[in-house]
Amino acid sequence: MLSELVYSVLAVVTLIYMATSVAYIVRLVRGPTLPDRILALDALSYDLAVFLALLSILLQRWVMVSGIIPLVLWIHAVDIYASKYLEAREMGE
């Protein structure tokens, strides 16, 4: 059983992650350029992965951690695809 101090710290950290998620969503919607939007989506996705890990600790549902690994791999694949798209666009292809 986790102690009350750990629950308190996890609750505060979860609130911080939720606040940063709102900032990332604002940047995703209002981003001035496409790379800014891609970076905001990337940060939001990794933020979601950490939030799911914190939630699994808070709820003591360790099965939730198994869903984080495919999520992070998908985020990495999207990063590679987006970077190839942006580089091809810069070269005029």
Image: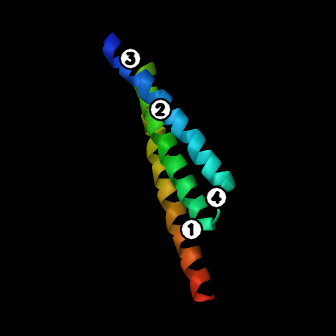
Q: Residue furthest right?
A: 29
Residue 73, given in percent of the width and then of the height, sits at 46, 54
Question: Of the residues shown, which amino acid type is indicated by label 4?
Answer: Gly
Relative to 26, is 78 above or below?
below
Residue 25, given in percent of the width and then of the height, sits at 62, 46
Nearer to us: label 4 or label 3? 4
- Is residue 61 in view? no
Horizontal side of 81 relative to 62 (left or right) equals right
Read off the residue under disc 2: 16
Nearer to us: label 1 or label 4? 4
Quarter assignment of residue 90: bottom right
Question: Of the residues shown, which amino acid type is indicated by label 2?
Answer: Ile
Read off the residue under disc 3: 7
Mark nearer the N terminus (4 vs 2):
2
Mark nearer the N terminus (1 vs 4):
4
Read off the residue under disc 4: 31
Question: Of the residues shown, which amino acid type is indicated by label 1?
Answer: Ala
Q: CA distance from mark 2 to mark 3?
A: 14 Å
Horizontal side of 58 relative to 38 (left or right) equals left
Question: Of the residues shown, which amino acid type is indicated by label 3?
Answer: Tyr
Q: Residue at x 31, y 12 (%)?
A: 3
